[in-house]
Image (cartoon, grey):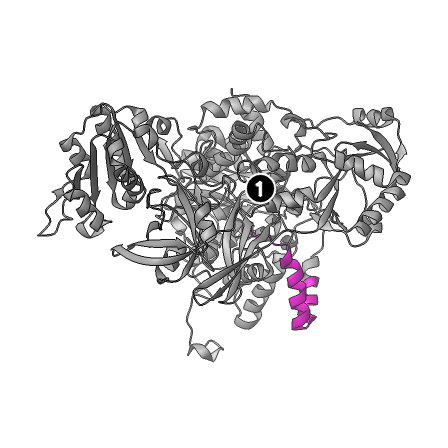
Amino acid sequence: MEEYVISLEGIKGLLENLTREGFNIYAPSKNNDRFVKVKDIDEVALFPDRRPTDISAKECLFPKCEPVFYYKREKNNVEIVDIDPNGNKVLFGLKPCDAASFTIIHKVFNWDYKDKFYNKRFDNSLIIGLACTYLDDYCFCTSVGLSPVSTVGSDILLVRLSDVSFGVIVITDKGGQLVKRYPQLFEKGEPTKSKQVLDSIGGPARKFDHKKVKEWLDNNFETDFFNSIGDICVGCGQCTFVCPTCHCFDIVDEDYLYSEGRRMKNWDGCQFYLFTLHASGHNPRDTQYKRYRQRVNHKFKYYVDRFQEVLCTGCGRCSRGCPVSIDIGDIVSRISKLS
Amino acid sequence: MENIYKPYLMEIKEIIDETPDTRTLRLQFKSEEDKKRFSFKAGQFAEYSVFGEGECTFCIASPPTRMDFIECSFKQVGKVTNALRRLNVGDTVGFRGPYGNWFPVEEMRGKNIVFIAGGIGLAPVRSVILNVLDRRKEFRDITIIYGARTVSDLVYKRELEEWQSRNDIRTVVTVDPGGETPDWKGEIGFVPTIVERISPKGENAVSIICGPPIMIKFTLPIMMKLGFKEDNIITTLENRMKCGLGKCGRCNIGNIYVCKDGPVFSYSQLKGLPQEY
Amino acid sequence: MADIISIAKSIFENQKAEMIIGYAKATKEGRTRPVVVRTLDEVKELVLNSFCLNNLSTYLTRKENKGKRVAIVAKGCDIKAIVQLIAENQIRRENVYVVGVKCSGVRRGFEGHDSTKIAEKCITCNVKTPHLFDELVEMKGEELPGTDEKAESIVKLEQMTANERFAYWEEQFERCIKCYACRQICPLCYCERCIADKSMPRWIETSPTKRGNFAWNIVRAFHLSGRCIGCNECERVCPAGIPLSLINRKMAKVAKSEFGYESGMDPNAPTLIGTYDVKDKEDFIR
């Protein structure tokens, strides 16, 4: 892997150049609640020690709602107007737990049927990661095969060397081309320096073996383990909405007028009663503990069975934000000790 | 890249009211190109849509051997099925598919086949029945056992009569006790009871069973008693679906997606699944 | 006054309830979680401190808890919700055993909120000593700093023109992701079928677009008018950080100033929205 050094000014210059190339820059908002389109590049700041945004970066490539086509009706006839997501994006300052999420959900959007909406956005974006020095009780990236310095998902990864200087690790061809386009901004770096910083970043305290979690889930579908969670979970589903890897969605139509409208793809979540409710009134996941069991299984078993990836990056958002303090890291680490 | 959410446009060519609340639509591709491109196998399903209302999942009820029309049958229960019912001949609906797996028709060649269906569960079975009848010579004895709650709940009545009049298949139609009319000439009794009475042989035979869960639950032990192999008892599962493409995440039963790995399952596969359907 | 654990023990020993809904330690220091305790062995889990933010009365209307005799640990504000639920005939007084908390105020929130400050609802709280209970327990709290900034925001909103206010809420609702966490946590959102979930007809667009978000948030505000007891759980749980208390408190303010009604105070008082009164000032109803 090639390494460079870039100054803080250089980063701003890079973003300015990319803006000129036609990229929209997305970075954590001022109050750190989500990734927003940057209006003023001078406002972009790099905080490796800030906690993950409240809502993950997933919405940059998989928005909370998007039209999949428009339709027009006239008498008996319907005309469908196909659309393509356009616009090039730079996702800037993603923590490795956010960057990795795209590598993970890429699989579900690309097996057999390919979702062009996700894919086009993915293809047209550049992901600039930032090695993370934030740690709290909810983080557990190292337990799901990642780390605060993981390069998974990033095109280039920035490593903070000082307030004004950042190491640049080039990961993908896209990242390499970026460096080649603006050679004046990048100095050839000493790999040891970034490495020193990277080595000094420890992992989160919470540690468990996700293979053990799967092992137990493989053999324990009918279990009372989830009952006490079902007691208190209110089914608000915020965990699924803030999650960088939860990707379930709903498809609905929206009319503007009788004559035209659009079909939408909206976020949806497994914690809702309606999610699996049949038209007949039957509901296979009729109680909250079943819905919670589904979430844990989907992340640590089903997705692994199908895509060989854990559907979780250990970012801890779901637990930080849970209104009733359900802590998924605690739950799965307890599960890992059961098998 | 293709838009996987974009449906084909189809025109309603004919509307057939099967029962007071069940209707069959006979659809035709609006574009010749789409029609040529399209193919499917018996048992596969599709997403049907009314623009402005949304999409809805049903199996394709017509056989792949009759490609002039695509037929679907649906019960009026929710938002989209109500909207579908409001449409008239000549109106346009969206059609996305075919999705999912299919009945192992090729593997059924040279075997005896027993079709068992209840209520609107006959829709997916009809696709394979017609498919098999169109290729009658390739299969051995064919038995059809179909039941509904009442006489008026029987679907595909014209075809039932036609099947009953053929002497190269055996067709038994039954209604639940109390569901008969004074002039009812068929059987009276629940489907499992009738299956037991008719006792089709399990040897060299495949059985396709579709219907309400309670019917399937009580029919399965009888099939086992009759000597059917677990691999040769085939049914379909339904779960709520939205995308049909293995992405939207709601139709899974354990780690299998009904929309991708189903809807057709053998009894032996079924036994390995968690109770989540 | 006895502590929460001994109270809980005596509840089970004297068979006053079959389950106790209370607070337990969460996995992280400085955080609690709701817990349902069903046996004597489990009562040791219970805690009571200024991190006991949740309004547990939201569990009382759960299908699986209905008709059961349930004990609940409730602060004055939470008891307002219980009172309102009784007034609205959702639960029976005799089925709830209320362990009222003499409360000195809770913190503003967990992660992402400033937990060193006192919750805004506590500053103007008029039920620090509960107004309905079967038994009292004291929460040992400390003095927490904090001012009621939301009161100022409401005044600011009142001074805006309609267009300005619309623009303000447009910006706020833009962030809504339609997770309905506000509804799920709300003790008074007990409808078996929420209007947002009805599809025939579809009253509220499910998409988190401007139209859908406005429809949802405004309908919820109206539906809670004269009912919301101000526990502010919806605002606390909103992952998008929408200041829902501004709407709810404004509506409560109107209920008070226009109709002299304060929700959650008297279980026997007729409810504001649920009561027909010929003396109502609006004449369309007559």
Residue C139 in which image quadrant: top right
Q: Position of residue A202 (x, y in %)?
A: 75, 26
Q: Is residue C40 visible?
A: yes
Total count of labels: 1
Residue type at tag 1: Cys
Side of A58 where B270 appears, left or right: left
Tell me what residue is drawn at x 91 percent, y 40 percent.
Answer: A184
Side of A253 where B178 appears, left or right: left
Tell me what residue is drawn at x 82 percent, y 51 percent.
Answer: A20
Tell me what residue is drawn at x 70 percent, y 51 percent.
Answer: A87
**Which is the main secondary structure of the residues drawn in magenta?**
helix
Residue C146: say if magenta. Answer: no
Assign the N terminus of chain A to one quadrant of the image.
top right
Q: Name, please, the residue furthest toward the left.
A: B182
Q: Position of residue C40 (x, y in %)?
A: 45, 30
Residue C167: say if magenta. Answer: yes
Q: Bounds of the magenta span?
A: C153-180
Q: Residues within 10 Å of mark 1 (few under 14, many from 20)?
A: many
Q: Is residue C226 visible?
A: no
Q: Nearer the viewer, residue A296 or A302?
A: A302
Q: Nearer the viewer, residue C241 or A219?
A: A219
Q: Position of residue B191 (x, y in %)?
A: 20, 38
Side of A95 where C58 appears, left or right: left
Task: Please say if A289 is above or below C153.
Answer: above
Instruction: Tell me the residue that label 1 is attached to.
Output: A239
Residue A116 in which image quadrant: top right
Could you tell me which chain the residue with mark 1 belongs to? A
Q: Name, please, the residue furthest toward the top.
A: A339
Instruction: Indicate the secondary structure of the residue bearing disc 1.
Output: helix
Q: Nearer the viewer, residue C171 or B249?
A: B249
Q: Position of residue A141 (x, y in %)?
A: 67, 30
